[in-house]
Image (cartoon, helix red, strand yellow):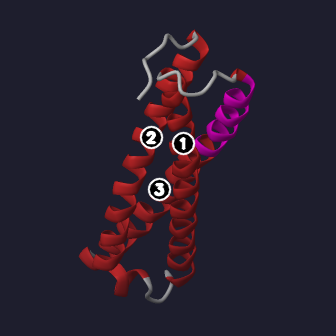
Amino acid sequence: MGTTTAMSARSLQYFVIATRWASYLEFFRVETVFFRHLIDEYFIRLGGPGHTENFIMICKALLKLEEDRKRADNLLTGQIKHLELMAEDIIQEDINSLSEKQIQIEYLVTDLVNEYRCVKNELFTLVEKIRKIKAG
């Protein structure tokens, strides 16, 4: 293991942002499991008359979210490892390469956050409609 060196301010900033994004992705992973349990709980009613199209759309969106989360997680893990190797002076700092990867991950995570919010809203709206029908 190499000795730890001082990273540039930009590389350190990338590392801090990347670890925050990793926390978001872990949250999405846990929430997706919760959504799947919610769907299991309401499966029959979610797939019932008048809800089938929305239910199918939500299930497809959840699958896409999971694929996108895994892709972002893989890119982010690589970026964090790269930054750690730089910090340990195992590889040289390459700001251009880091910047390109950071921008790519940022777009992916931003899109994931926005899509996640939409899917969550759609799922909860559908569950609420079904709960009101059941209660009424």
Q: CA distance from mark 2 to mark 3?
A: 23 Å
Segment tinted magenta in the rendering: 96-109
In the rendered image, the quadrant that contains the N terminus is top left
* Label 3: how many Cα within 10 Å (few below 14, some 14–19, many 20+): few
The residue located at (63%, 40%) in the rendering is 105
Chief secondary structure of the magenta portion: helix
Q: CA distance from mark 2 to mark 1?
A: 7 Å
Residue at image mark 1? 76
Crowding near the residue tagged with mark 2, few <14, some 14–19, many ≥20 C-alpha atoms within 10 Å:
some
Per the image, label 3 sits on a secondary structure element best described as: helix
Is residue 95 at least partly visible in the picture?
Answer: yes
Which residue carries the number 2 mark? 22
Q: Is residue 81 left or right of residue 107?
A: left
Q: Please state which amino acid type lies under the numbered disc 3.
A: Asn
User: SS at mark 2?
Assistant: helix
Marks 1, 3: nearer the viewer: 1
Label at residue 100:
none
Give the Cα separation between the discs numbered 1 and 3: 26 Å
Q: Earlier in the sequence, mark 1 or mark 3?
A: 1
- To which residue does mark 3 refer? 121
User: Of the residues shown, which amino acid type is indicated by label 1?
Assistant: Leu
User: Where the C terminus falls, by quadrant?
Assistant: bottom left
| Picture layout, residue 129 above or below residue 15 | below
